[in-house]
Amino acid sequence: MIIFNEEKEKLIQILSEQYSKNIIDIEEYERILEYINKIETKKELNIIEKIIHENNNPNNNELIIKENSELIIPKTKEKHLSVFSWRTSIVKSINGNGGKYLSLFGTNRIIVDNLPKGKTVLNINSIFGLTEVIVSKDIKVINKTKPIFAGIFVPNELNMEVEELPELYITGKAIFGNITIKIIDEYNNENEFEKRLKEKIMQKIYDKI
């Protein structure tokens, strides 16, 4: 336990140095510091350590596509963390980069409804967590995520046959977690159904009073 606490203290020291050098802002510093304080296992520690060290990497906004068409996410400072928490984010494409999203024992809801033409890469990792990607019906979705003891759910219609639409490449992994991709109309219909169901339940409760 003493060794484990020493490793956490080292992470806090590195995090403080990043803040003092303006590598991260106060909001990210406080958020990651909270995650460190909640760490209980070596595996969680390794994940947070990786996130902290990635903050030191230089920005690289060029897309890399290998000969076998495998697409690699470029490095970016645009990171969205959901650790033991829930958050909603709207994707902004910067030179074809949609950012990195990590859900660790938490939930990330990612909304994609306004992309420029061309390719936008979105990197998602869902580790013991849930990531929900809600995509506009006018965007072509190419799913490259990989499940590892996890579930990845993709709708039937992803505009694969339609030309000249913005393209969203989704890369990453789900490890003991879940990644769900939904078309925005499907998402709105589900919300409407839930709303009507709640209204019926509340009405029955009022009728019994």
Image (cartoon, rainbow, N blue to C red):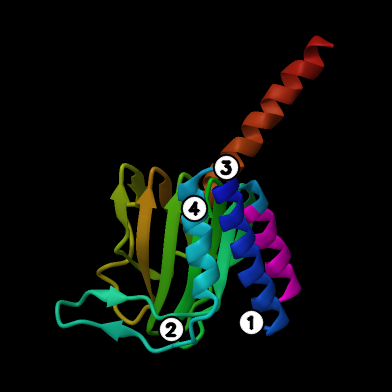
Ranked by sequence position, the earlier of labels 2 and 4 is 2
Which of these two is toward me, 17 or 6?
6
Distance Cα–Cα, label 3 vs label 1: 30 Å
For residue 93, above or below residue 160: below
Secondary structure at numbered mark 1: loop
Ranked by sequence position, the earlier of labels 4 and 3 is 3
Give the residue number, with chain letter if any, for mark 1.
23
Secondary structure at numbered mark 2: loop
Give the residue number, with chain letter if any, for mark 2.
96
Q: Mark 2: which amino acid?
A: Gly
Q: Residues within 10 Å of mark 3 (few under 14, many from 20)?
A: few
Distance Cα–Cα, label 1 vs label 4: 29 Å
Say whether residue 24 is magenta: yes
Q: Mark 3: which amino acid?
A: Met
Say whether residue 161 is magenta: no
Ranked by sequence position, the earlier of labels 1 and 4 is 1
Q: Please indicate, yes or no, whether residue 83 appears anywhere in the rendered image.
A: yes
Q: In the image, which disc is placed on residue 1? A: 3
Q: Mark 1: which amino acid?
A: Ile
